[in-house]
């Protein structure tokens, strides 16, 4: 069975990636499971750059095939913040309930289309031979007026997707994974991996 190390310490993200890729004959190993402790400086200006930085760093450390995900929330009304700083927004250890309230408060004057936002996910896979694959997925929505839903993690309770009449935090996990930014990015990456790796 092929093995890929997933360069993340985020258990929610790891759980989603495993669910999305469950039908592939592949072993996905988190950094924790691989016994890897690495403090990687994510200093890219795009999600793709940060995903590549993480994937390459762990690939060079281990000599293994490594997949990394960099994802976040872009809110148009506040200049696409928090963007690539989504995980570090207001401090890395700040609870998402605080981060979510801060974003809702900053949009107090925003109405209708002004509340537009999106989740973006970039996936990078780094191979020991130097090849790097990337893919991107996006799901469009609006910032809600309050947190709704306890599924998912992070900013999920405040991103309302009008097409489905609910926040991503209210979605059934399997359904969310089929339409989410991460689901789309991984689906595109899976097609590339099938051609090159399986």
Image: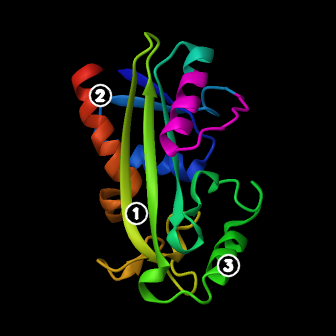
Point out residue 84 in the picture as x, y percentages from the top left corner: 59, 51
Q: Residue at x 75, y 54 (%)?
A: 92
Q: Quadrant of the C terminus?
A: top left
Q: Name the residue under label 1.
A: 173
For residue 41, what is the image quadrant? top right
Q: Which residue is drawn at 40% across and 17% down?
A: 131
Q: Tell whether position 55 is magenta.
A: yes
- In the rendered structure, find residue 186 and report the number of the disc placed on it: none
Q: Tell whether position 98 is magenta.
A: no
Q: Mark 3 points at which residue?
A: 101
- In the rendered structure, find residue 193 and report the number of the disc placed on it: 2
Query: What is the residue that sits farthest to the front in this orientation?
Result: 79
- Magenta stretch bounds: 37-58
Q: What element carries label 1?
A: helix
Q: Residue at x 51, y 45 (%)?
A: 47
Marks 2, 3: nearer the viewer: 3
The front one of 183 and 21 is 183
| Earlier sequence position, callout 1 versus callout 3 | 3
9 on left or right of 47: right
Disc 3 crowd rating (10 Å Cα; few below 14, some 14-19, many 20+) is some
Label 3 near label 1: C-beta < 8 Å?
no
Q: Is residue 97 above or below residue 92?
A: below
Q: What element carries label 3?
A: helix
Q: How many labels does the image show?
A: 3
Real-space CA distance between mark 1 and mark 3, rounded to the nearest whole angstrom: 23 Å
Disc 1 crowd rating (10 Å Cα; few below 14, some 14-19, many 20+) is some
Q: Residue at x 42, y 29 (%)?
A: 27
Q: In this view, does 135 lie above or below 53?
A: below
Disc 2 crowd rating (10 Å Cα; few below 14, some 14-19, many 20+) is some
């Amino acid at each position: 069975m092929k093995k890929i190390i997933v360069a993340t310490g985020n258990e929610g993200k790891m759980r989603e990636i495993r669910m999305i890729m469950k039908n592939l004959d592949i072993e996905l190993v988190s950094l924790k499971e691989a016994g890897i402790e690495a403090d990687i400086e994510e200093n890219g200006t795009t999600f793709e750059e940060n995903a590549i930085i993480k994937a390459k760093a762990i690939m060079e450390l281990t000599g293994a095939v490594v997949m990394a995900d960099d994802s976040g929330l872009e809110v148009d009304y506040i200049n696409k913040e928090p963007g690539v700083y989504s995980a570090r927004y207001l401090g890395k250890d700040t609870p998402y309930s605080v981060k979510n309230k801060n974003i809702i408060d900053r949009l107090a004057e925003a109405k209708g289309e002004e509340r537009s936002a999106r989740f973006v996910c970039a996936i990078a896979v780094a191979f020991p031979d130097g090849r790097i694959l990337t893919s991107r997925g996006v799901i469009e929505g609006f910032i809600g007026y309050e947190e709704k839903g306890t599924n998912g993690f992070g900013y999920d309770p405040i991103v309302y997707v009008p097409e489905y009449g609910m926040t991503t935090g209210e979605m059934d996990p399997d359904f969310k994974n089929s339409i989410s930014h991460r689901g789309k990015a991984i689906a595109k990456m899976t097609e590339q991996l099938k051609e090159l790796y399986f």
